[in-house]
Amino acid sequence: MLKGRTFVIASIVFFLGIEVFSPALSFAQSKYWIEFADKGISNKTFVPGNPIFEKTKASLSRRCLQRRALALHEEEISTITIGDAPICPRYLRSLRANGIKPLAESKWSNAVSAMLTPRQAKRLLKLPFVRCISPVGHADLVSTQPMTIPARLRCAVARMNPQSIDSGCGYDPIIYHYGDTNIGSNNRAEIYRLNVWPLHAMGFDGSGVLYGFLDDGMRWTTTSSIEHCKVLSQHNYVDDTDVLYDVPGDSVYQDWHGTTTLSSAMGYLPDTLIGPAYNATVMLAETENAGSERNVEEDNYANALEDMEARGVEITSSSLGYFTFDSGQHSYSYKDMNGHTAICTQAVDSAVKRGVLVVTAMGNGGDKPYPYVQAPGDADSILACGALDVNDSIAGFSSRGPTSDGRMKPDICAPGVEVWVQNHDGSFSGGTGTSYATPLTSSSCVLIKQAHPEATAQQIRHAVMITAANAAHPDTAYGWGEINAYAAALELGTIVHPMQASSDSVVARICAGIASKYHLKNVYLTYFGNRDTTTRTAPFDLVADSLIYSCSVGNAGSPITKIGTTMYFKISALDSSGVTTLNPRSGWDMLTLPGTSGVADNPQNAITSKLDVFPNPCSSELEFDSNVPGEWQLVNSNGSSVMTGTSRGAATVHIGTSQIVNGAYYLQFISTSGEAKTASVVVHH
């Protein structure tokens, strides 16, 4: 609903009363949102079995419904509302019959954008299904506002001293490849300030989390630090194409901003640039036209957010801000920064209600005549990000709170001055603006989500805010303060993450990252083979500070199961508060044991690697995302293969399960490069 905008139409209609004195005005077109009164169907008839309901259901991925169900504590089918239904086709046909060509559609707002003359707008208002008409404006990229950048300073960061590990089990090697302490040649300082390194050390890299990025063009396929990205989908909403750079007519800067922000979040160039969530699965949306005016349209933003939500996105990141519009169009005022007026804010609010964690920039106007938050940063229940300088002081340009209705902003802060990024021409430099605080925050949240897949968006947001540096005394400059990713992850519960699993004919070794905000009293492995009749247990030993644990099965105290079989296992961690955390939470992980001796032990080549399968449990169908080609098989508890298939990569794989019996299964995926991944699956009809 486009609340609070009908008054705009009143002024248009009043002006139309004198349009005969300005003939040219009658034919000048501007872009408007046309909001409809309903979806052409009532709430009472929008129920399962209704054709419109079934069409709506088919447009939402199972991953989307699973995320909604988790956030809303409802059955998946109950999370589908009339707001998800498509715009009524009759209304669209009527517009076309009146010579109006819809440019973009928003099912959440029940509106379309179109180019209209004032006379057309007046005529459309007489149609019974049109609720109101509002102008669509443009907004600035928040990173391109003029700002004073302080002289480059060296940020003193304490170096960790991880102990030497002889057991073949230790920190993930990525933490040794952030680069040296020179802030001008790598992003080591940002990683430390975000306190991301403990999560990296435990093997978290964003795997399995669906991440959405909204920006201008992104030259990811030819930029060295991000060419590895696992891109599930990409779309250019400006030109309605799937090409994100070098589109005819593009400004030479069209792919600059998006490339730099993406590199800060997902870069992977050891010793030069490591983004927090370098291995997440990402959906890319080009919503910004960076031409000479560097503006972005709100309908592109709303379209992209709707599409991402329907595909199952869990966390989105956008470094865009809306406030001052092009000449001749309706601009926002401070009173509009109330969490429900701006079109983009309404879109964000709809995504939040459906379980998406939205991370966006505050804006770069802190030292300008208008110093306050820009939309959609005014939305409630999101993370609006302020920028810190290299000394962890609030940057002068970082926009301030509160919102016009009195809510505290920003929600969180992160480094936003001299952030190390890769540019679209391949060079590296320091980026400044809340545009860079935003992807650093959102990618940190991706790691937290990976550590706690059971956590909802609002639980992650709450944990991030209450563990931040200024949580005891939030204010309108820092908000809750600088993010502490590791502390936020611990706030959500004990972390248990299998990192490596390896075996030879004598010993099977399991290495895991395990940490708790409470003292860990007991950590142990429960395991059995598919030829065994009972389970066994074996203790884990701490091998690296307080993060990494190792368990060896096959020594005198913990006999290994018979060779040539499959070992099933799970990890249990009991903390001093009396809570036991399991991984996996249901079912078992698995490790195939070699049938002959002399198999080399390679602990850095993890045999056990998580697959993100949904829904789980499943009834008639399960899905998993595969971004590389390979083969899969579904194995029953006896170790027999019941279904097999292939994946071409960069696609969601659908597996029908309606014809197999209820029970526990294991989905195995082997990529063409030989990487093996396994996930437990429960089928229940």
Image: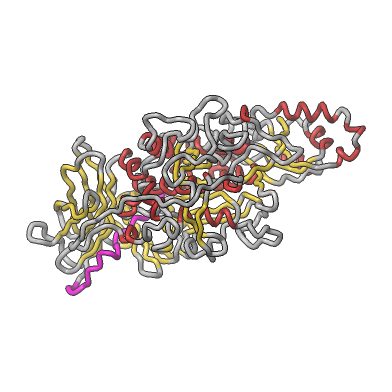
Q: Residue at x 30, y 41 (%)?
A: 490
The picture places residue 519, in percent across and down from the top left corner, at 20, 40
The colour scheme used to paint the residues is secondary structure
Q: Which SS does the magenta portion mostly show?
A: loop
Specify start and end residues of the magenta stretch as a single range.
Answer: 596-614
Question: Is residue 70 depicted above or below 595 in this figure?
Answer: above
Rendering quarter of residue 40:
top right
Question: Is residue 353 depicted above or below 391 in this figure?
Answer: above
Q: Residue lying furthest left in this view?
A: 556
Question: Is residue 352 depicted above or below 254 in this figure?
Answer: above
Q: Quadrant of the N terminus?
A: top right
The picture places residue 67, in percent across and down from the top left corner, at 44, 42
Rendering quarter of residue 609:
bottom left
The image shows a total of numbered marks equal to 0
Q: Residue at x 54, y 53 (%)?
A: 284
Q: Horizontally, is 101 left or right of 581 in the view?
A: right
The picture places residue 157, in percent across and down from the top left corner, at 34, 50
Asked if the stretch drawn in magenta spans residue 600, the answer is: yes
Q: Residue at x 79, y 30 (%)?
A: 12
The picture places residue 427, in percent across and down from the top left corner, at 53, 63
Most foreground residue, 590 or 443: 443
Quick check: can you spot residue 55?
Answer: no
Most foreground residue, 624 or 265: 265
Asked if the stretch drawn in magenta spans residue 510, the answer is: no
Quick check: can you spot residue 160?
Answer: yes
Most foreground residue, 549 or 197: 197
